[in-house]
Image (spheres, rainbow, N blue to C red):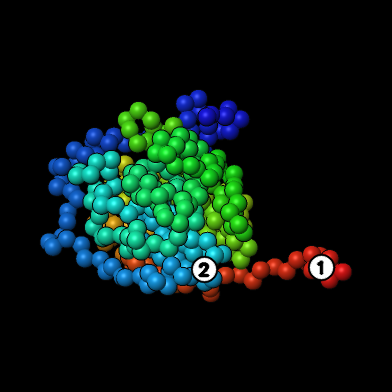
Amino acid sequence: MSDPKRSHHTAAGFQNNYPEGKRGSYWKWQRERWQKGLPEIPPGGYRFELLRPDVAWLRSNRTEPTLTWIGHASFLLQLGGVNILTDPHLTERASPFGVVGPKRVVQPALRFHDLPHIDAVVISHNHYDHLDRATVRRLAAQATGAPRFFVPLGLKTWFAGLGIRVGAELDWWEHAQLGALSFTLVPAQHWSARTPWDRNRTLWGGWVIEHPAFRFFFAGDTGYSRDFEDIGRRLGFVDLAALPIGAYEPRWFMSVMHVNPAEAVKIHRDLRARYSVAMHWGTFILTDEPLDEPPQKLAAARHAAGISAEEFFLMKHGETRRLASMMRPIARDSAREAAVAR
């Protein structure tokens, strides 16, 4: 698995590109949470609006580019006639267990029976809120045929254990094609584990999904690092970036692995993104900040940076955003056109 020629490969697995500082103690965090009575849940719980997507239209749509927020880091992206899911999680808990662990505050905006035929699935890493076993098994068994799964290095074996064939297992900056779309795994600052014994044995990262007229960046899960400046320089720009804004407190523990809203704004700038959409908030209670705080913090960070709410926007659970206005004209290949004319 490991490749000594690549600095993010180790003898046992993988590491981040840049020094990340000393990680805090998980058990210290849990003790502080217990002492402070965190997380605090408001009386009556959280009441986020859940929109009902136009399921029939999404199923039939193969021409108009759209983005639908299912919740947390799960989006349905329709691009170039291809239906793509990011880190799909459509079950009740982000946990290896069915009865304990973080439970959904907002139900998935699209259920399995609502989905159009899914052509592709991208997985950023193997944490339970991003890689849900029951969800990928149901997707692999869809009646219209299994989607193509794009995963980081090391996860092919895990999928094979479920009887699921992986279409492409990639290292950072490797890419695979599906029709006119290119899927590239890019660096992020994070880590991986599903048990106490497999820490960093599989890779993590974000995804760049590229159409001739549109470049979509999906960050997955990440702390802030120079990786995003590198990505911005290498790509030149991003048309739309899906960036996490939640699960960031306490900073002494979470900062190396989860960005806060101000850092998400920095990533937006580093990527030279034309637009960004917020994700990874409002669905699971994973950390100590109130679940409805990230949008408020994002608004303050945007204002401080001079970025409008249209440039870095929020979506409601279940909202579908039509992306045609973000598409760029496809550059004409004059040499090819001349050859065809001859």
At x 63%, y 63%, the residue is 212
At x 38%, y 69%, the residue is 55
Amino acid type of the residue that numbered disc 1 sits on in the rendered structure: Val
Viewer-closest of 340 and 333: 340
Image x and y of residue 114, in percent: 36, 64
Q: Which residue is mark 1?
A: 340
Q: CA distance from mark 1 to mark 2?
A: 28 Å
Q: Which of marks 2 and 1 precedes in the sequence?
A: 2
Image x and y of residue 32, in percent: 19, 41
For this orientation, the residue located farthest to the right is 342
At x 57%, y 29%, the residue is 3
Figure check: 288 above or below 272: above
Q: Quadrant of residue 256?
A: top left
Image x and y of residue 35, in percent: 14, 42
**The residue tagged with tag 1: helix, strand or loop?**
helix
Amino acid type of the residue that numbered disc 2 sits on in the rendered structure: Arg
Residue 219 appears in view: no
Viewer-closest of 332 and 42: 332
Residue 92 appears in view: yes
Viewer-closest of 229 and 187: 187
Viewer-closest of 250 and 329: 329
**The residue tagged with tag 2: helix, strand or loop?**
loop
Crowding at label 2, few (<14), some or many (≥20) Cα neighbours within 10 Å? Answer: some
For this orientation, the residue located farthest to the bottom is 325
Crowding at label 1, few (<14), some or many (≥20) Cα neighbours within 10 Å? Answer: few
For this orientation, the residue located farthest to the front is 143
Image x and y of residue 64, in percent: 52, 71
The C terminus lies in quadrant:
bottom right
At x 45%, y 47%, the residue is 124
Q: Which mark is residue 121?
A: none
Q: Locate residue 9 relative to residue 222 in the image: left or right.
A: right
Q: Which residue is mark 2?
A: 62
